[in-house]
Image (cartoon, rainbow, N blue to C red):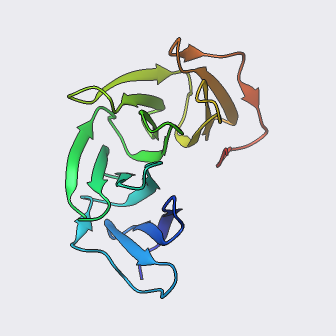
Amino acid sequence: DEKVRSVAFSPDGRSLASGADDGNIRIWDVATGGDKTPVTMRHGKYVYFVAFSPEGDQIASGGGDDMLQLWDARLGVCTRVLEGHTDWVRCGAYSLDGTKIVTGSRDKTLRLWDRTSDPVTSITLEGHTYTVTAVAFSPDGTLIASASEDDSVRLWDVKKKAPFGRPLSHSDYVWTVA
């Protein structure tokens, strides 16, 4: 009876990944509704986000254990544990070309991870004053939008790794961007 915090379709639409408060990630067959998780896929604490890579071969997840985990979507095996945030990883997204992942955290920061480097590297983007609740890449991959409980949306220039323009203010928490 744990809350499901995040769901994501695979690029081909045949599978759905879900992450829940029990720390488990499950993969579902959309056509049958059957659980096709090959093995237990688990974070140490809550799973706040799941996302399929554009290729569909990898699932990224973030949770209450302050880590970004990368999973083989077919085998269900964790292939990388990426540390850098100092509090819950609340949200994440792949760039459309699949080379980058952006994550947002309760530590008030975003991290931009480069999947093409070995080991995977990241840089920190700072500017929010409270929990980052949602992130998204622009269709061309040049900007990131982030939402926060600081009542703002911020834009970030991916190439410059810096803020783009001024914060976009709301009158209360902002929970999502797309």
Looking at the image, the residue that sits furthest to the top is 160
**159, 124: nearer the viewer:** 159
Query: Vertically, is 158 above or below 109?
Result: above
Quadrant location of the N terminus in the rendered image: bottom left
Query: Residue 3: percent from the left, percent from the top?
Result: 47, 73
Judge left or right: residue 169 versus residue 120.
right
Query: Residue 147: percent from the left, percent from the top?
Result: 63, 38
Query: Residue 4: percent from the left, percent from the top?
Result: 47, 70
Query: Residue 151: percent from the left, percent from the top?
Result: 69, 37
Residue at 35% from the left image edge and 55% from the top image edge: 57
Quadrant location of the C terminus in the rendered image: top right
Query: Vertically, is 106 above or below 121?
Result: below
Judge left or right: residue 93 versus residue 174.
left
**79, 61: nearer the viewer:** 79
Query: Vertically, is 76 above or below 130?
Result: below
Quadrant of residue 140 within the rendered picture: top right
Residue at 79% from the left image edge and 39% from the top image edge: 171
Residue at 34% from the left image edge and 34% from the top image edge: 85
Quadrant of residue 17 within the rendered picture: bottom left
Residue at 36% from the left image edge and 72% from the top image edge: 26
Query: Vertically, is 153 above or below 49?
Result: above
Judge left or right: residue 158 versus residue 169.
left
